[in-house]
Image (cartoon, helix red, strand yellow):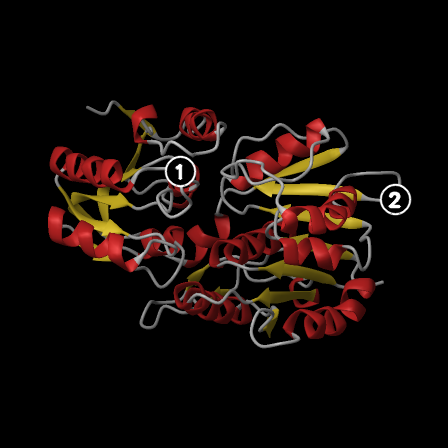
Amino acid sequence: MTGRLAFVESPVQLLNVLEWAHATAPHDTTPRPLPGVPGQPARRTPAPGPGTPGLTVVVLSPTDPMSRGQLRRMAQLARDEGITVKWQDARQGRGAVARTLRELAGPLRAAERVIVGDPFSRYVQLLLTLFGPRRVTVVDDGTATMEFAAQLARGERLVRWHRRGSRGPRELVLAPVTSLARRKLAPGRRRTVEIFTSLPVEPPPGTTVLVNDFSWTRSRFGPPRLTRGADLVGTSLVETGVVDPDEYLRAVTALAATHGATRYFAHRRESTEKLHRIAVETGLEVVRPDLPLELIARRGPIGRTVVSFPSTVVHTLPLALAGTGVKVAVCEIAPEWLRANASPRAQGFLAGVAGTATRSERLEFG
């Protein structure tokens, strides 16, 4: 068996596959221009090693336009690195799932290593039932990586932290798939499992953890120009049913006033209605990034202070912006902001995300 096969469904997952390829490939110091940044001069940066062309990334394309647009741009950056990218419209049209499974069965069986961007994805879990890879790498998919590692260690079924855990008809139908996928994502006598992450995770027994320090991002972009003000980073906690929208708006308004923020970087899953309300009621300039925030911030311009609610960026931005002088601050979610039907695990999980962000400054709210 030869080759490495990665499955990604979001721009951040593809970014972290690029970081993994960079971290695990031999490097040289050939001067070359920065990919995707016209007009920037060549600099001495690590070039793709001989192993990079052996990597194929399969984009299991989502349906929402923002994610698809960012993924298109990330796919071009991956191709600039010598990586093969296969775009798979896995969710469009009748028969898309069956067609995708049929087309990917052969490459999956032939892969020496499978790289997974989202172990909670039903699509990825279904693919893993076709063939159990002998080497598995799970790259960061945001804070879900922390929950994956914890659930794997405890032998629990894979459930996203913001779900309430109720098992409806769809969950019951998919339960055998999830159970089998969990076994194929766990280390065993014939399987090694690696977690590539910038987050503080305790390695489950039998797994290895490779640290993601965003060296590819830092070598390809920046350093950024810094603005005088602050920037706020949005979150999709309202859209996932965790935080009350009115409480969220009040928090954004207060943070903007306290820190002199002028821009609000929207999460790709934030609704148009919510963003319009933020722009009208706070006066903030709402920015919808065309790439993951780590690349946008590194490319600049970016505020000297970046304020975020608990999310992956309070762990990743300090790494991506290391040495630039940018301060990243995290504002915790107050219990009264949570919706009544939010998952019982939400408060503890979000507190853990903020509390373990040792490179970010903690903010007292209110």
Q: Residue furthest front?
A: 169
Q: Nearer the viewer, residue 31 or 163?
A: 163
Above or below, 138 relative to 78:
above
Residue type (three-letter) at the residue carrying disc 2: Arg
Above or below, 84 relative to 194:
below
Q: Quadrant of the N terminus?
A: bottom right
What secondary structure is found at the residue carrying circle 2? Answer: loop
The residue to which callout 1 is attached is 242
Disc 1 crowd, CA 10 A, few/some/many (<14, 14-19, 20+): many
Q: Which mark is residue 313?
A: none
Q: Nearer the viewer, residue 225 or 73?
A: 73
Picture residue at 46% right of the left edge, 59% below the top: 44
The residue to which callout 2 is attached is 190
Side (left or right) of 366 relative to 55? left
For marks 2 and 1, give the one nearer the viewer: 1
Picture residue at 49% right of the left edge, 38% below the top: 162
Q: Quadrant of the C terminus?
A: top left
Residue type (three-letter) at the residue carrying disc 1: Val
Side (left or right) of 74 relative to 166? left
In the image, residue 151 lies at what x, y percent?
65, 32
Picture residue at 25% right of the left edge, 44% below the top: 232
In the image, residue 255 lies at what x, y percent?
19, 35
